[in-house]
Image: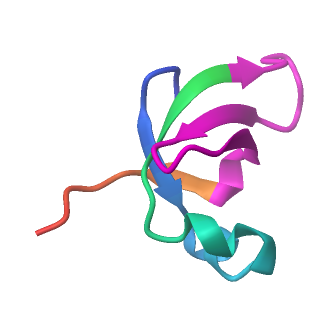
Amino acid sequence: MKVGDLVELSSRAKSVKYNRSLVGKIGIVTEKANPSSIHELYFVHWFSGSQGFMNRNELKFARRKK
């Protein structure tokens, strides 16, 4: 995953109550935090107006909806 990719929540992240407001939303990766770290953290700006750091296993690439 790299800066500029469109993302959405993975199934694991959808099950967490904290992320309930982001279910079904699309975001854009704007920064990779500490690229040399073991844990891959990404700063995501969601199109709903919120933003924050997300772990790589909480994100998946956005797919086109039919």
Could you say where residue 12 lies in the image, as x and y percent from the top left?
66, 74
Q: Is residue 63 above or below residue 27?
A: below
Could you say where residue 14 lies in the image, as x and y percent from the top left?
62, 76
Point out the image quarter for the C terminus.
Answer: bottom left
The magenta region covers 32-58
Residue sitting nearer the eye, 23 or 57: 23
Could you say where residue 1 lies in the image, as x and y percent from the top left?
53, 32
Q: Is residue 10 left or right of residue 37?
A: left
Q: Is residue 17 left or right of residue 23?
A: right
Q: Is residue 19 above or below residue 44?
A: below
Q: How is the image coloured?
A: rainbow
Q: Is residue 1 above or below residue 48?
A: above
The answer to if 15 sits in the magenta stretch is no
Report the residue that reaches farthest toward the front: 49
Residue at x-position 70% and y-position 33%:
42
Image quarter for residue 64? bottom left
Residue at x-position 69% and y-position 82%:
15
Image quarter for residue 24? bottom left
Q: Is residue 64 above or below residue 1?
A: below
Could you say where residue 23 lies in the image, as x and y percent from the top left?
53, 71
Residue at x-position 73% and y-position 46%:
54
Residue at x-position 67% and y-position 58%:
58
Image quarter for residue 11? bottom right
The answer to if 40 sits in the magenta stretch is yes
Residue sitting nearer the eye, 45 or 57: 45
Q: How many marks?
A: 0
